[in-house]
Image (cartoon, grey):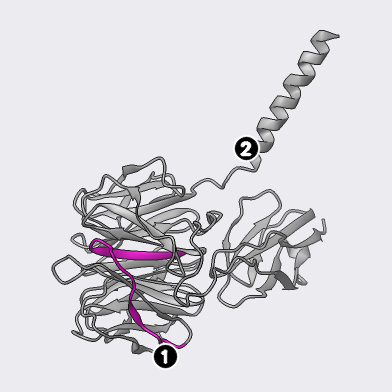
Amino acid sequence: MARKKGSLIGLVLALTLLASLLLAAPAGAFVYWADTQNQTIGRAENDGSGVNDAFIQTGALPFAVAVDSSHIYWANQNGNSIGRANIDGSEVNNSFIAGITKPSGVAVNATSIFWATLGGQIGKASINGTEVNPNLVTGPAEPCGVALDSGHVYWADIATGTPAYIGRAGLDGSNKQLTYVTIPGTSFPCGVAVNSANIFWTEPGIFGGGTRIGRANTNTGTGADPSFIGDAKTPCGITAFGSQIYWANSETNTIARANSDGTAVNQSFIATGANQPCSVAVDTLASPPPPPAGGSTGGGSSADITPPQTTIAKGPGRKLAQGKAKFSFRSSETGSHFVCKLDRRKAKACTSPKRYTGLKPGTHTFKAWAIDAAGNKDPTPAKRTFKVPA
């Protein structure tokens, strides 16, 4: 009897361990930065632990970094290229996209890569590195940093003098606005980030020594506050993730973090061990950490903690006999992005409509989750079960 009891306890412990592994945070829940002088891409856990400044050796001067569910991308400013590696740091390719003169920013969505160049262009390519268009947007004076939302690409312009500007255009380069945000009293913004409520930028200073993080209204471009957050140390590069913003302090070699309403500022959230980090990125499919305590101050809005609702509008289509299915889906919140999963395959970033081909006969289940601009993920995915005939 004692032996059976021991076996039962062992089974319970094993099942408990398995459950804990299944419920753990998704692989790749990391913060990344570009170490310009050590020529590396660094990373740490998204709670600030596990710092590794030499996660990827680039052999170039990485000036900006971006990440999606499967790859890490960086802008090689003196290598005139966009580099890429697998999310685990393997298969490093410093010339994934070559022939880009002095790239100063990089951003990705589910289908495309965007970059800014100090020569005055915003470029775009397919996420696999093909269909390269180096002149998607022309006209910016000297863009430094690039960011995306569901409908626009944004850049900070460092060569316009005072005031400085944030520009934006449609994701296809249309509706160009070189002066979408006018920033008073600022002459050198470098780094830009965006969420559904605000555009954020960093001001490193022409020769360093800058101390400010600014913000403006995303939907109107108005209300520019160049001193939204102070006491930074030559901030270079910024990203928005969930209810928080992160920036690189290149003077103190730290990654800073704050709530997106400007509260709970931590200028030394991660001691990177880098030498002049510039740019920071956070996994878009990681569950956002809860906002640090601090509350709202000075008229700032409360953090968005309400998840969106996902709806499948159409699917799976009329071509099931051919092993094909197509799903259209939407979110209850504008500016959302999506994650899709079919059967036991790994969940990946996706856009609507989502198409599948080569499906085997039998029953299949499709799921889609919306993630809003604040990083809140629908806890109950939209689901559709369907059958492919033999």
Q: Looking at the picture, how far across and down is residue 12, in whole percent?
A: 75, 26
Q: Which type of secondary structure does the marked residue at label 2 adopt?
A: helix
Residue at horizontal 66 percent and vertical 57 percent from the top? 341
What's drawn in magenta, residue-wise?
220-241
Residue at horizontal 77 percent and vertical 14 percent from the top? 6
Dot label at residue 21: 2
Query: Local crowd at mark 1 within 10 Å, few (<14), some, or many (≥20)?
Result: few
Residue 95's quadrant in the figure?
Answer: bottom left
- Quarter of the image that includes the N terminus: top right
The residue under label 2 is which amino acid type?
Leu
Identify which residue, 21 or 2, lies in the foreground: 2
Residue under pointer 1: 175
The nearer-to-camera label among 2 and 1 is 2
Residue at horizontal 37 percent and vertical 89 percent from the top? 176
Asked if residue 2 is positioned above or below residue 144 in the image, the reply reads: above
Which residue of the protein is positioned furthest toward the left in this rendering?
Answer: 207
Q: Looking at the picture, how far across and down is residue 310, in whole percent?
A: 69, 69
Circle nearer the N terminus (2, 1): 2
Asked if residue 320 is positioned above or below residue 298 in the image, the reply reads: above
Residue 282's quadrant in the figure?
Answer: bottom left
